[in-house]
Image (cartoon, rainbow, N blue to C red):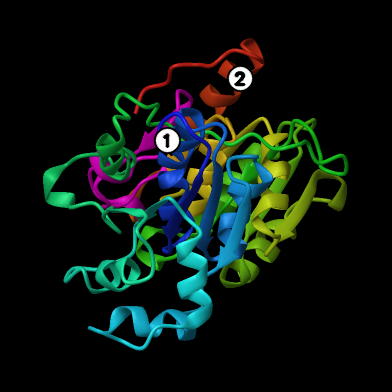
Amino acid sequence: MSGKQGKILVIRGGAIGDFILTLPAIAALRQHFPRAHLEILGYPHIAQLALAGGCVDAVRPIEARALAGFFARNGELSEELRDYFSEFDLIISYLYDPDQIFQSNVRRCTPAQFIAGPHRPDEAAGVHATRVFLRPLERLAIFDADPVPRLRLPPDPEGPTGWLALHPGSGSERKNWPEARWADLFRRLLEVPERRFLLVGGEAEGGRLQHLAAAAPPSRRQVCQSLPLAQLARRLQSCRGFVGHDSGITHLAAAVGLPVVALWADTSEAVWRPQGERVRLIRWPKGLRALPVEEVQKAVEAMLAEHAGQEHAPTATPG
């Protein structure tokens, strides 16, 4: 690839957070090979973030049926995918492939350089996921790349500006602060009359969002449920701060540059902490469910005060 234009394919499955934590690797490829065509084979509803942010040139959907033969030893390979893989000069895969069966089958289709990356970090090693996903690029002489996911999208002209985003859910109930405490926090934050709120969630958080929304007049809140991720990212980008759990949406908020307060459960902070200069984590000795509302309110007020005082400057915040 060095010194010439070519085609690079990054294969990335996984959830929203996994993809966002792989963005530094994608950004490093773009920086080091600016003239190359850079493409993602992944889930379009997630990979659209990289396309909308100008990080890649194209996204192709992973189709499990077409890929099935690539996970069987000496499997029957889709002719369409054979032709597709043959177009690339460099293929970097973050798929789970412990026996290198997928890698071997791709090599049957193309002489492209193939680099296998981990689909998840080894939590026992205690190395942050972004650095783990960057390591395979050392084979391309890419060292010391920025490990912070950064995503900048065109602004949403219809989105509210300067609102506070709240995401009261996550992909796992054990990562969620109790709904009653969210309601208490929301009531307290509403006591400042000029504040407006973006209530964010997916299908699973519908009940929580509606319960929170009922506590505020429509003029002071907007419910954003199950928005396409690129549209949600643009809405978040115009907010003044974000409060959420250990979730992919919290990683998204940090990636678009928001000040973030993350209510953390028992996931390894060293491996999965959202990256960014304006991220503060709250962990409570007795566990997330026992985290007092007062502690969260204090962190949110501090975040908002810092943002108000340094509207356009990054703020270093403690974990």
**Image position of 236 with respect to 97: above or below:** above
- Is 231 left or right of 276, judged from the image as shown? right
Q: Quadrant of the C terminus?
A: top left
Boundaries of the magenta span:
263-288
Return the x and y of residue 288 as percentages of the image width and height: 34, 51
Task: Give me the residue at 31% from left, 66% from top.
Answer: 107
Q: Pointer 2: residues within 10 angstroms few (<14), some, or many (20+)?
A: some
Q: Give how far across and how far down residue 92 sits, in percent.
A: 37, 53
Task: Look at mark 1 in the image and give the residue it sits on.
Answer: 295
Q: Is the N terminus in the top left, top right, bottom left or bottom right quadrant?
A: top left
Between 187 and 145, the one lying in front of the other is 145
The verdict on residue 286 being magenta is yes
Q: Is residue 318 magenta?
A: no
Circle nearer the N terminus (1, 2): 1
Q: Are marks 1 and 2 in contact (CB under 8 Å)?
A: no
Q: Position of residue 189 (x, y in %)?
A: 64, 38
**Residue drawn at x 69%, y 60% as measured from the top left:** 228
Crowding at label 1, few (<14), some or many (≥20) Cα neighbours within 10 Å? few
Identify which residue is drawn at 44% across, 53% down: 10
How many marks on residues? 2
The residue closer to the viewer here, 36 or 24, is 36
Q: Nearer the viewer, residue 290 or 175?
A: 175
Q: Residue at x 81, y 39 (%)?
A: 160
Would you say residue 247 is visible in this rendering? no
